[in-house]
Image (spheres, rainbow, N blue to C red):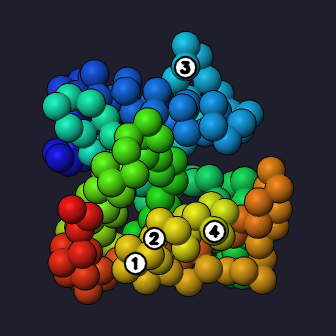
Amino acid sequence: MKTDILSWSNLHLKGDLWIQHHGLRYQSFVDRQGWEVPSHDQLEWDQYDNPRAIYILISEQGRCLACCRLISTIHPYMIEEVFPDFLPYAPPKKPNVWEASRIAVDSSLTAVKRNQALQELILAIQQFGIDQGIDKYLGLMPIAIFKKTLIRNGVRVRIHEAQAKAIDGKKTAVADIFVDQKTIDYLSGHKAA
């Protein structure tokens, strides 16, 4: 599997993957989860898809399998503007804290392939964090998904359950997702076959 880190300065070099990633988000968030978010021609996006965003894309043979959007909290970000009451503290505005959002893995993959793509995505997000001096990411998702995807794969996460609320019938929370070389080492030794 291949990892690409895209920003608005280089996404023209990977235009097909860029469009595929918006399609993957549509599949995950509009089709499967029924979110009412901006979409057109089976592509999903929102106001945080702007020149400040960084995208981690995992692909194989030119097909986007998994994705994540990252935004520094020094810029406007979703949790700060839409879900600040999910935090037990004021939304941070720090260069070493970023938001990780729009995490998606292609649901049409086999379970083994989905897990491989997810693990590659987690590794890439963690490595990007280390390279950029990021201490933690903020993420918002159903608590069960934090446990099933991140915690199960060795990511150190602090879920703010006291501030959790139901979204679409699922107990949803913000969590601190810590950037840690130990996570990379653990996951590198426990990759799916």
Whole-number angstrom distance, CA of label 3 to CA of label 2: 27 Å
| Residue 93 in sight in this render | no
Whole-number angstrom distance, CA of label 2 to CA of label 4: 10 Å
Which residue, given by chain and number where applicable, does mark 4 sit on?
Answer: 144
Secondary element type, mark 2: helix
Query: Label 2 sits on what residue type?
Result: Leu
N-terminal of the pair, mark 3 or mark 2, is 3
Q: Residue at x 63, y 68 (%)?
A: 144
Tell me if label 3 and label 4 are in contact, CB under 8 Å.
no
Whole-number angstrom distance, CA of label 1 to CA of label 4: 14 Å
N-terminal of the pair, mark 1 or mark 2, is 2
Which residue, given by chain and number where applicable, does mark 1 sit on?
Answer: 155
Indicate the position of residue 143 as horizontal and vertical percent values. 65, 70
Specify the label residue 150 is tagged with: 2
- Viewer-closest of 115 and 143: 115
Which residue, given by chain and number where applicable, does mark 3 sit on?
Answer: 42
Secondary element type, mark 1: loop
- Viewer-closest of 100 and 108: 108
Query: Label 1 sits on what residue type?
Result: Val
Whole-number angstrom distance, CA of label 3 to CA of label 4: 27 Å
Indicate the position of residue 170 as horizontal and vertical percent values. 77, 60
